[in-house]
Image (cartoon, rainbow, N blue to C red):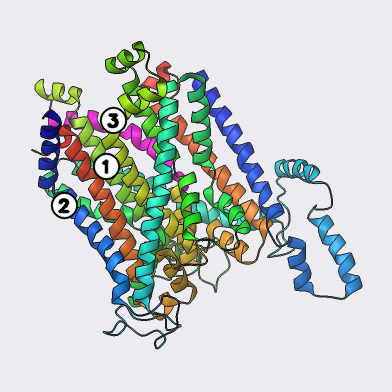
C-alpha cells in the first residue's frame, strides 16, 4: 500500500517535472518573439522602440541566460506568477486563467462524472438484454465515435439556430457582468447546457459500451456460473459482475482524461465558451505564448490531480490493492 | 487439417455475426467511395469553381463553400486523408504499443518499472502542448507528419493492455518449456506469445485506427493539422471559421462529421463483432 503510493507519487513528480519543462519551452522555442509582437503592435519611433524593446525584454525576463530563465521560471511558478499576457497586456496570466477556470470546472466535472455514472449503469443494464442490446447500444457506438466538435456543431446548429432554443455563443449573456444574481445564474445555465450535453453524450456512449462489454465478460466468468449454479438470484450475480467490471472502467477514466480534455477544448471553441480551451485558441491566434504556457500548466495540473484522485478511488474500491498487491497486476 | 477446421470455424462464426457484417459493410462502402470518388468529381478541392455557398444540387452534390469550392470534392479528399491517418498513425501506435507491451510484460522487473513509468508519463502529458512546439518548427505540415505524431503519442493504452496480456501468458507451461529448451527471449515472444495474441493485436490495431482518425479531426479543427492538404477536420474548421453555423450552411459541416462518425463507429462495431468471433465465450447462442 505504502509502496504502491510512493511509486505512484514518484511517477507524478517525474511527469510534472517533464511536463513543466516542455511547457517552459513553448514561449522560448516558438518562432516570433513575444517582444516583437508587442513592438509591432506599438510601431513607434526608432529611438523609443529601442527603449521599449529593452523594457519589454526585462518585463518578460528574457534578458538572462537560458538556464537562468529556466530556474527563474520554477521560482516564479511556486509564487503563482506565470508572467504577463501579451494578448491582454499587461494583465498577469494567472489572473486571466483564474477568470476562466471556474467555467471549466463547472463544465467538465459534471459532464465527466455524470456521463461516467450514467454510462456505466446503463451499459450494465443493457448487457445481455437482447432488445436493448440491438436497439440502443448501436446508438452508443455512434455517440462514442462522434467527434466532439461535430456533435457540438450539430447541436448548436439544430437547437441554437434552427429551433432557436439555446444561445450558442459565450458563457453568459454579453449584456451582463458576472454577479451572483438569479438573472445571471439563469443566463449562465442557458449557455452552459449545450456544451455540457455535447460533452456528456460522447462520454456516455463510450462508457455504456465499455461497461456492456465488461459485464458480458464477467457474466461468463467461472464465479458467475458458480453463483448461478448455486441458485443465486439474477440480480445478485449481476451485482457481483458490476463490482468487478467497474474496476477497468475506473482505470479507463484515467486513460481517457487526455481525450476528454482535448474534446472539451474543441467544444469550448465551437461555443466560444470562456474556459481555458477558448483561451488556448485565442492565445494561438494572437501568439500569446505566455498565456498558452499558463493554460497548459493548468491543464497539466488538472489532469495530474484528477489522475491522483482516480488512483485513490481505485484503492478504495478494489480490496486487492488495499491488502498489498503492489503495482497493477491487471 | 486442424488449422483448416479452426479457420473454418472462425469463418463460420464470422459470417453469422451481424455486428461484423454491418461494421464491415459500412467500412467497405467508405473505402470504395474514397477510391472511386475522384472519378465522380471534376473539381479540385481548393479551386474556386462554383457560385458561393450554394446548397446541394445535381451539379455540386454537397453544395459549395462560401468561396465557391466544391464540398463533395473536399469530402472525398478528406476521406482519403482520414484513412491515411488511420493506417499510418494507428499502425505506428499499435507497433509501439506492441513493442513496449511485449518487452515490459515479458521481461518484468526493472525494465517493466521503467517502461511503465514512461508509459504513464506519455499518457498524462497533454499532447496538444507538445504538438504546438513541433508545429512551430514545421513550416509545411503534411498528413504523413501528422500521422506519425499521432502514432507517437497514442500508444500508451495499447502498451498497457498488451503488457497485461503478455504478463498472463508468460508463466504458461508452453512458454516455460520454450525457455527450458534455451530459446532466445525474442524468439519466444514472436513464436510462442505473439501467435496466441494475434486476434487481440488485430483488435488493438482497429481501435488505434479509429482513435487516430478522431485525434486527427481534433487537431485539424484547432488549426494544427496539415497545411497542404484537405481533411475532414479542416473542413469543419473552415466551416466554423467562416460562420457556416450562423448562416445555416449545413451542407458544409454535416458530411465530414457523418463520415468520421460512420467510419469510426463501424470500426468499433467491427471490433466487437470480431471479439465475439474470436472469443467463444462471447458468442451469443
Label 1 neighbour load within 10 Å: few <14, some 14-19, many 20+: some
Q: Secondary structure at mark 2?
A: helix
B184 lies above or below B259? above
Residue assigned mark 2: B21
Determine the residue located farthest toward the right in the rendered image: A47
Q: Relative to B111, is B212 above or below?
A: below
Instruction: Find residue A189 and report its horizontal and vertical position in percent.
Output: 44, 62
Tell me, yes or no, whether the highlighted magenta stretch contains residue A237.
yes
Query: Separation of disc 2 and disc 3 at Cα?
Result: 25 Å
- Quadrant location of the C terminus of chain A? top left
Q: Residues within 10 Å of mark 3 (few under 14, many from 20)?
A: few
Q: Residue furthest bottom?
A: B51
Magenta stretch holds residue B264 = no
The Cα–Cα distance between marks 1 and 2, rounded to whole angstroms, is 28 Å
Classify 10 Å Cα crowding around label 2: few (below 14), some (14-19), many (20 and above): some
The residue positioned 87% from the left and 76% from the top of the image is: A45
How far across and down, in percent of the image, does residue A143 sit? 30, 55
Q: Secondary structure at mark 1?
A: helix
Q: Chain of mark 1?
A: A
Labels 2 and 3 in the same subunit: yes
Compared to A16, does B180 lie above or below? Answer: above
Residue A61 lies, in percent from the top left, at 80, 52
**Residue linked to disc 3:** B195
Q: Main secondary structure of the magenta part?
A: helix
In 3D space, how far apart are the residues under numbered discs 3 and 1 (Cα atoms)?
36 Å
Q: Which residues are magenta?
A: A233-258
Q: Is residue B192 visible?
A: yes
Answer above or below: position of A77 versus B109: below
Amino acid at each position: 500500500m505504502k509502496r504502491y503510493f510512493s511509486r505512484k507519487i514518484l511517477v507524478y513528480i517525474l511527469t510534472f517535472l517533464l511536463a513543466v519543462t516542455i511547457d517552459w519551452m513553448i514561449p522560448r522555442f516558438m518562432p516570433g518573439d513575444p517582444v516583437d509582437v508587442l513592438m509591432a503592435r506599438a510601431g513607434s519611433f526608432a529611438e523609443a522602440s529601442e527603449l521599449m524593446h529593452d523594457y519589454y525584454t526585462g518585463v518578460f525576463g528574457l534578458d538572462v541566460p537560458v538556464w537562468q530563465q529556466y530556474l527563474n521560471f520554477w521560482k516564479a511558478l511556486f509564487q503563482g506568477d506565470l508572467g504577463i499576457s501579451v494578448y491582454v497586456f499587461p494583465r498577469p496570466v494567472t489572473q486571466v486563467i483564474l477568470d476562466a477556470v471556474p467555467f471549466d470546472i463547472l463544465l467538465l466535472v459534471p459532464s465527466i462524472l455524470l456521463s461516467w455514472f450514467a454510462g456505466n449503469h446503463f451499459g450494465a443494464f443493457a448487457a445481455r438484454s437482447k432488445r436493448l442490446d440491438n436497439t440502443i447500444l448501436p446508438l452508443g457506438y455512434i455517440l462514442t465515435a462522434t467527434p466532439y466538435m461535430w456533435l457540438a456543431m450539430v447541436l448548436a446548429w439544430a437547437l441554437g439556430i434552427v429551433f432557436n432554443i439555446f444561445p450558442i455563443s459565450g458563457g453568459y449573456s454579453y449584456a451582463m457582468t458576472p454577479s451572483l444574481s438569479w438573472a445571471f445564474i439563469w443566463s449562465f445555465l442557458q449557455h452552459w447546457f449545450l456544451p455540457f450535453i455535447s460533452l456528456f453524450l460522447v462520454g456516455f456512449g463510450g462508457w455504456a459500451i465499455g461497461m456492456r462489454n465488461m459485464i458480458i465478460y464477467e457474466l461468463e466468468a467461472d464465479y458467475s456460473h458458480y453463483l448461478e449454479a448455486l441458485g443465486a438470484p439474477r440480480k445478485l450475480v449481476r451485482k457481483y459482475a458490476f463490482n468487478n467490471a467497474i474496476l477497468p472502467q475506473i482505470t479507463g477514466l484515467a486513460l481517457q482524461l487526455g481525450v476528454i480534455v482535448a474534446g472539451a477544448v474543441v467544444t469550448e471553441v465551437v461555443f466560444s465558451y470562456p474556459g481555458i480551451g477558448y483561451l488556448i485558441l485565442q492565445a494561438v491566434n494572437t501568439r500569446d505564448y505566455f498565456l498558452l504556457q499558463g493554460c497548459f500548466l493548468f491543464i497539466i495540473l488538472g489532469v495530474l490531480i484528477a489522475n491522483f484522485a482516480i488512483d485513490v478511488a481505485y484503492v478504495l474500491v478494489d480490496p486487492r490493492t488495499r491488502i498489498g498487491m503492489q503495482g497493477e497486476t491487471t | 487439417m486442424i488449422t483448416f477446421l479452426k479457420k473454418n470455424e472462425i469463418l463460420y462464426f464470422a459470417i453469422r455475426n451481424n455486428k461484423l457484417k454491418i461494421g464491415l459493410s459500412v467500412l467497405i462502402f467508405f473505402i470504395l467511395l474514397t477510391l472511386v470518388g475522384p472519378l465522380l468529381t471534376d473539381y479540385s478541392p481548393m479551386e474556386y469553381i462554383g457560385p458561393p455557398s450554394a446548397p446541394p444540387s445535381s451539379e455540386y452534390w454537397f453544395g459549395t463553400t462560401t468561396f465557391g469550392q466544391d464540398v463533395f470534392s473536399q469530402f472525398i479528399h478528406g476521406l482519403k486523408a482520414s484513412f491515411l491517418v488511420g493506417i499510418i498513425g494507428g499502425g505506428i501506435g499499435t507497433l509501439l504499443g506492441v513493442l513496449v507491451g511485449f518487452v515490459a510484460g515479458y521481461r518484468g522487473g526493472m525494465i517493466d518499472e521503467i517502461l511503465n513509468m514512461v508509459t504513464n508519463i506519455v499518457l498524462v502529458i497533454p499532447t496538444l502542448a507538445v504538438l504546438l512546439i513541433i508545429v512551430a518548427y514545421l513550416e509545411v505540415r503534411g498528413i504523413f507528419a501528422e500521422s506519425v505524431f499521432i502514432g507517437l503519442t497514442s500508444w500508451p493504452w495499447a502498451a498497457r493492455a498488451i503488457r497485461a496480456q503478455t504478463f498472463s501468458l508468460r508463466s504458461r507451461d508452453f512458454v516455460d518449456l520454450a525457455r527450458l529448451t534455451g530459446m532466445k527471449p525474442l524468439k519466444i515472444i514472436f513464436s510462442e506469445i505473439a501467435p496466441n495474441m494475434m486476434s487481440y493485436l488485430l483488435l488493438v490495431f482497429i481501435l488505434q485506427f479509429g482513435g487516430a482518425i478522431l485525434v486527427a479531426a481534433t487537431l485539424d479543427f484547432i488549426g494544427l493539422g496539415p497545411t497542404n492538404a484537405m481533411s475532414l477536420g479542416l473542413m469543419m474548421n473552415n466551416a466554423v471559421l467562416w460562420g457556416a453555423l450562423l448562416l445555416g450552411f449545413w451542407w458544409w459541416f454535416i458530411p465530414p462529421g457523418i463520415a468520421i462518425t460512420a467510419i469510426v463507429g463501424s470500426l468499433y462495431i467491427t471490433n466487437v463483432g470480431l471479439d465475439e468471433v474470436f472469443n467463444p465465450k462471447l458468442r451469443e447462442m
